[in-house]
Image (spheres, helix red, strand yellow):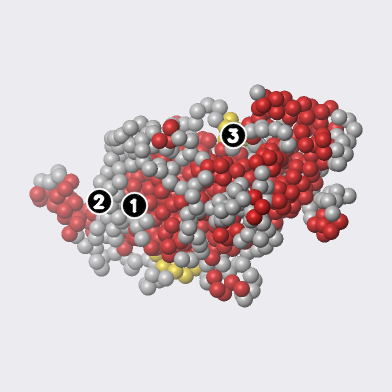
Amino acid sequence: MGSADSKLNFRKAVIQLTTKTQPVEATDDAFWDQFWADTATSVQDVFALVPAAEIRAVREESPSNLATLCYKAVEKLVQGAESGCHTEKERQIILNCCRLLTRILPYIFEDPDWRGFFWSTVPGAGRGGGDEDDENARPLAESLLLAVTDLLFCPDFTVQSHRRSTVDTAEDIHSIDSCEYIWEAGVGFAHSPQPNYIHDLNRTELLKLLLTCFSEAMYLPPSSDSSNTNPWVQFFCSAENRHALPLFTSLLNVVCAYDPVGYGIPYNHLLFSDYREPLVEEAAQVLIVTLDYDSSTSSSPTVDGTTTGTAMDDVDPPGPDNLFVNYLSRIHREEDFQFILKGVARLLSNPLVQTYLPNSAKKIQFHQELLVLFWKLCDFNKKFLFFVLKSSDVLDILVPILYFLNDARADQSRVGLMHIGVFILLLLSGERNFGVRLNKPYSVRVPMDIPVFTGTHADLLIIVFHKIITSGHQRLQPLFDCLLTIVVNVSPYLKSLSMVAANKLLHLLEAFSTTWFLFSAVQNHHLVFFLLEVFNNIIQYQFDGNSNLVYAVIRKRNVFHQLANLPTDSQAIQKGLQRKKRTPEPISRTNSQEGVSMEGSRPAAPAEPGTLKTSLVATPGIDKLTEKSQVSEDGTMRSLEPESLQSSPEGNPSSAVSDGEPWSGEASHPRRDRRRLSSASSSGQWTPSPDWVMSWKSKLPLQTIMRLLQVLVPQVEKICIDKGLTDESEILKFLQHGTLVGLLPVPHPILIRKYQANSGTAMWFRTYMWGVIYLRNVDPPIWYDTDVKLFEIQRV
C-alpha cells in the first residue's frame, strides 16, 4: 500500500504547487520535501503525475514557485554529492530529484524567457554556512552538472566501493580518484568491475538527466552559425569537470564492451532483464551529444590527426577545448583501436545475426547512434580511420551499413539512416585502402533482398547501390551523386567485377543517359559523367581481371554510341522532354535482369503509416562535400585546385550545385522540398538549351571506351562468325586473354573526391542526432509534445 500512498501524496503536492498563487518560501522544507523525501515514485510515475499542462501553468502563473522547485531539487543533488549519499533514503531522494528535473527541464527550455534561468545564480539562497559564499556564485546549471558528475562516481550508488567496511569509514567522494572507478575495462582501463544492476540503473537515470540538460539544443532553430555552442555541453566537457576523463572513458568502454548476445543461450533475453542495455543506449546518446563539434571551423592539430598526443601541450592553437573531442582525437594505442572497432562492429552486426530459432537472439535498436559514434571516431581521429582501413576488419563495418541501406531504402522515416550510412562510406572511399579491401570475396550470406551473386565485397556494394537507386523512394534522389562518387573513388582498385555487378552498372548508365532524364534537371548529366569515369578507371587500371565488365560494355555498346550522338538542337531537346511526360517513373527496372533474391530475405518495406519521423536540414552539394585529390605514381594524394574540375562543365553557372540549392532538403519547407529529378523543369526557372547541352556533351569522357569498342567489337564479331559461337563463356575466355596495351589513350590520373568537413554537414549531424534521440526516448517520453524547434516531427 505504501507505494500507492506515496503516489497520492506526491500528486497532492503537485496539485498544491499548481494551485498556490502565493510564492512558497524556499525555507519551507515541509512543503518542498513532499516532492522527494517520502516518495518511491518511478520515472514513469513522475511523468504521469506531473502533466505537461500543469508544468506550463506553474511556469506562466507562479514562476517563482517553479524557480524554487528547480533550485531546491538541484540543492538536494548537490547535498547528495557532498555527503556521498550513504543511506538508502538519501539515494532515493537523489533519484526522485533526478526524475523530477528530467520531467521539468524541457518545459524550461521551450520558453525563451526561461532559457537563461539555469545560467543565473540564485540570489540570497545561501547553502548553509557563510563560508560557502564563493560557491553561491555558481550558476545553477553548473552546480547541477557538477553534482551529477560527482554522483556518477559515488561509491555504493553508481560504482563499487573499494572499502570493505562500515558507513563511518566510507570513502569521501571528494578525495577519491575517479579514474580508479571507471565503469568498464577497455580504453585506458584494464580492470572489469563486477556487474551490479542497481548501479547500472542509477547510472542510467543520471545519464538521462544529463541528456535532458543537453537537449536545450532541440529548442533552437537550425542555424549555419557554428559558433552556436551548447552551453551545457561546453561546461560539461571543460576542465571544470574533474571527472571528464574517467567519464569519457566509462561511456566509451561501456558501449564498446557490450555484448547483447551474452552467453548465447537462446531466448535468454526473454528470461532475464538486461540492465546493461538501457545504460549502453543512454551512454551512446550522451557520448555522441558531447562530441557534437564542428571540426571544419577549428584549426585544431588533433582533430585532423596530424600531430601526436605528446605535441598537445605546447602547440598553438591548442586542441579543442571540448575535452571529450580532445580525448577521442588522442586515442592512439593499437589495442584501444582494436577494442573500439571490434565493439562497434559486433553491435552493428547484431541486427544481422541469423539464428535458426526465430527471435532467439537479442536485437539491439541503437544502431543509428553507433553509426554517428563511428563517424565521429573517423572524423576526429585520423589514426583510427587508418587503423580501420589497415585490415579487412573494415568489411565488418561495411556489410552492416550496406544491410541497413538496403533495408531502409523504401522507408521514408529512415532517410536519415540512409544519409549517415552513405556519408560513412564516402569518408572511407576517400582512402585507397578501402578500394583495395573491397576485393575480398564476399562469403558471409546475410539474407538481403538483392540478387544472388558470387563475387567480392565490391560487387555487394554496387548491387546494393543499384537497388537503392532503382527501387528506393523519391527522397533518396539527392543521394545519387554521393553513391556514384563512392563507386568512382573505389573503381581504380577493383580487380574483378562479377557479371551481375557489371550489368547493374550498365543498367544505371542506360537509365541515366535517356534524353528525358538528361534534359529534365540541370545537374542530371553529372551522374553520366560519374559512371563514365568508373568505366574509364576500370578499363585503364584494371582491364586484365575485368572481362565481365568489358563484355557488358560491348553488349551495351549502343548506349555509348547514343551518348556520343546526343542531339543538341531545340527540337530534339523538346522531344526528349515530351517522352518524360509519358514515362514518369524515373528509372525502370524492366531491362535490368533481376535475379532471384537471397534466401531468407524480406523485401524492403515502406514505413508503417503514422510512423513518426523528424525532419532534417539540407546537406551541401557533392562539390561542397568533397574536395578533389589526384593520386600520384607512388600512391600519395595531392589536393587539386577547384579549377581543374573536368566533370562539372565550365560556362554553366549552375552545373555544380551551388550553396543556394541544397541537394538534400528533407525539411518540410515547400521551397526546399522540390523533387530534384524534375525540380528545374517544373519550377519554370530553367529550361535546357542547345548551348547548355553542347557545353557538357563536348566534355563527355568517351575516348577510352570508344577506342576499346573500336578494337574489340570487330574481333568479337569475327570469332562469333568464324567459330559459330553463341556461348558467352567462350567470348569471356577470349576477352580474358585479350590485351589493349598500347592501344588505349594514355591513362588519365586517378581523381579521388575526399570528404571534407564543413559546417553544413555539422548542422545536418546535429539535427539528425537529436531527431534520433527524440524518437528513441519514448519510455518515458522526455520531449514528446514540447515545442521543439531544431526539427519538425512529422507522420509518414
* Image quarter of residue 228: bottom right
x and y percent of residue 543 in the render? 27, 60
Rendered-image quadrant of the C terminus: top right
- Distance Cα–Cα, label 1 vs label 3: 39 Å
Amino acid at circle 2:
Asn
Nearer to the camera, 318 or 15? 15
Q: Residues within 10 Å of mark 3 (few under 14, many from 20)?
A: few
Left-right relation of 161 to 566: right
x and y percent of residue 56 in the render? 78, 33
Q: Which residue is mark 3?
A: 778
Amino acid at circle 3:
Val
Q: Which residue is mark 1?
A: 458
- Give the mark toward the camera: 3 or 2: 3
Nearer to the camera, 68 or 664? 68
Nearer to the camera, 460 or 259? 259
- Distance Cα–Cα, label 1 vs label 2: 14 Å
Amino acid at circle 1:
Ala
Label drawn at residue 222: none
- State the SS at label 3: loop
- State the SS at label 1: helix
Query: Which residue, as the protein is rendered here, is positioned at the far right?
Result: 22
Mark closest to the chain's N terminus, 1 or 2: 1
Q: Which residue is mark 2?
A: 548
